[in-house]
Each structure stands twice: as structure tokens, then as C-alpha cells.
Image (cartoon, rainbow, N blue to C red):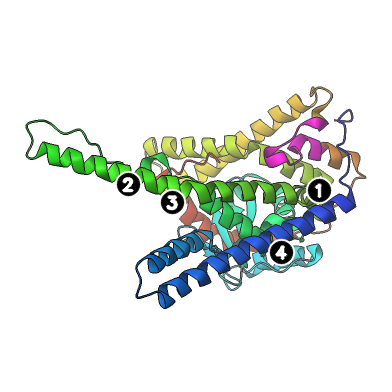
Amino acid sequence: MDSVRQTPPESPFLVRCRTAAAYAVAAVVHLVTAGLFIGGVLLIVLGFRTVVQPMVGVVLLGMALLLRPRPGRLDAELPTLRHVDAPALFDLVDRMADAAGVRRIDAIQLGPEFSVTVTHYGIRRRRCLVLGFPLWAAHPTRKPIAAVAHALGRLSGHDLRGDAFVGTALESLDAMARPKRAGNSAHVPSGAPAHSYRAEDVAGAASLFNARTRKGEWLLGIPRAAAAATARLLSWLVLPATRRAEFDADDLAARMASTEAAIAASQDRQLARAVGIEVHRLAIAIRTLKGDRSATAAQEALWEEVARYSGTLREERGRDETTEPDGIGTVVGPAGLPSEPLRMARLAREPRRGATITLDELDRNRIEDELRRPGQVLTRKIMRDCVPLTQ
């Protein structure tokens, strides 16, 4: 990895200018949403005796509804932990949040993914740490600590995608610009057997319905195209700050859990898709071929196999990285962000750091006890539904 070339650092002036422009665009989005809502209400109320004005008001209210800020929600199907449910785990996460200088986590959910993320829920944008149970169950403690530290580092304020002002505007634009799924297209087949009752009337009504649907989709296509263009602009404006947030999160993970653990956590993020698919396959195989094993033994076998598989993947990836060609530093990850290999190489070049957040044996056992029951609930869900973990 020593031959990996670093990307040039972002100009602080450029970052500040594009950040200010991002806030300006987000302000315009929120003002347009408020204007559409107020204008729609006024047209309906003041023009109630007319026909055109209330209809225009309903259209404006519909557009405001599409652009409305969407407060997140907790996933009702995942086990949720509060402070009273897992004091040792929350004490660890609170210590990490204090060290990172961010607001503490309000809830923790166990998820089926091989990753750790932080989401927001409610109007007050409370924070929920979604702790991937496969990651926690398959690896030693320091690697999940590095993954949690990286997720908390993204909340430091530099990542505008999670900002309450810019982030909500970007989410609203994405929701409005998102096209309907093909399976939800409102289309009625107009072909009917000639011998069926009133076949000509059915075909005519279907054609009329489809024509009106196409007109409605065409009218919605204009604001959707405008929302998509604005979303692309806003995403481009926040990109330098988001890159900086990624590097800051890597540094925080190295400072809390050690450089080696931070590099291993970055490597695990590359394995998330493969491990997710393997969890899905193992759930089907164990449920089908459980034999005489009890449900508890089958669940334990699932995580043992996941740990073995992820360890094998990590060893293979480590051997491959020793033969990476020069120029890997120019590789760009999703959405224009630095690639994982580039970030791992950057951490490897930095001075080695030891772990500042550690767990003694007593605390580790307490956390394992606190996660045992919710982990069983999540495992039963995976074994029952065979969730396809492919993201």
C-alpha cells in the first residue's frame, strides 16, 4: 500500500464556499416547500367559491407534501435497546460519543447488516445507533468499537448529508425525484376477450384511464425533473465536506480503537455485501437442514459459520491487497467519495496509534449478557424470514 498515491487535499476556501452554497440551496428548498403549502392553503380558503383556485391549491399542497421534511422512524421489526436495557453498552457508546465531541445516542437497535450506522428518528432528530449483530458476533471487540467510532465520527458536523438543515432538504428532493417502481405503475390492460360481457366498454374505459394516467405522470415529471436536478446540485456542493468527514471519521476510529482496528473495520465495510449474502444462504441452509439440533444450537451455528466465513474473506482480501497495482489512490468510491483502499492506505501511512477506548473482561461480559436476548430475537427473525442481506 506504500505505493498508493494520495488525492490532493480539498482547498479550505473551496469547502467553505460550497458549504455556504449548499446551505443557500437548502434554504431555497425549505422556503419553496413553505411557500407551496401556504399558497395552497390560501388558494383553497380564499378562493373557495371558485373552481380553479381550489384545484390549483390542491396541486400546490400535493407538491408541498412531496417536498415535506420526513422525520425518520425506528425500525419496528428490529430489537431496540434503551439506557435501562443495556447500561454497559450505552456507557461504552456514551464514552465514545463524548470523546468524539458529538451528542450522545438515544437508542440502539440490533440490525442484520454487517455494518454500523447512525440514523435519526422523530421530529427532534434523536439518534439511533444501528449495530450490525453479525459484525459484533463475528469479530473481537476492538473491530466493532472502530466501526462504532467511525459511525460517530460522521456526526461531527462536517458531513452535511446528516445535517438537520441540509440533510432534510436533500432527503426531500430525493423522495420527490424518486420515480415510481415499475410494479406500482397505474396501468390497466385494455385487451379483453371479445366474447366477454361488454368487452368494448371495458376496453374503452381502460384506454381512457391509461391516457389520463399518462397525462398525470407527464405533469409530475416536470417537478420531479427539477427536484432531481436540484438534488444533484446539492449533492455536488456537499461532496468536499463529506470527503473531509470520511477522513475525520477514519482518524477518530484509529484514535479510539487503534490504527490496526480502524484498518480492519475499513476492510470489513468492503466485505459487507458478501457476508450479507452468506448470512442469507446460511439461514436457509440451517433452517432446512437443522436436523435434531435445538433452535438455540442452530442459532449459535449460524454465527459461528458467519465468523468463519468473514475471517476467510478477510484473509483472502489481505493477500490480494499485497499485490494491488500502483495508482489505486485514484480510485473513487460511491458518490465520488474516497475509496476504501485509499482510506486504508492513508491510515497505514499515519503514525501508529493505540486504543484509547477499551473494555475489560467484566464489561465485555456484561455487554454480551445485555445483547444475548435481543440477539436471539434478531436471530429468530433472520432464521424465520431469511432476510436477503445484499446491500
Q: Nearer the viewer, mark 3 or mark 1?
A: 1
Residue holding disc 1: 247
Mark 3 burial class by Cα count in 10 Å: few <14, some 14-19, many 20+ = some
Report the side of 86 relative to 224 (left or right).
right
Q: Quadrant of residue 58?
A: bottom left
Asked whether, in this view, residue 313 is left or right of residue 323, the answer is left
Query: Is 72 covered by the magenta stretch?
Result: no
Q: Which residue is identified by label 3?
A: 380
In the image, what residue type sits under mark 3? Answer: Arg
Give how far apart the Cα atoms at labels 3 and 1 are. 37 Å
The range drawn in magenta is: 329-344
Q: Residues within 10 Å of mark 1 (few under 14, many from 20)?
A: some
Q: Are marks 4 and 2 in contact (CB under 8 Å)?
A: no
**Distance between the Cα atoms at labels 3 and 2?**
47 Å
User: Which circle's residue, 4 or 3, is located before the other in the chain?
Assistant: 4
For marks 1 and 4 on the same chain, the one whose residue lies earlier in the sequence: 4
Image height of 29 relative to 324, above or below: below
Q: Which quarter of the figure has residue 317?
A: top right
Q: Which kind of residue does numbered mark 1 sit on? A: Phe
Most common secondary structure along the magenta stretch: helix
Residue identified by numbered label 4: 92
Are dots 4 and 3 in contact, CB under 8 Å? no
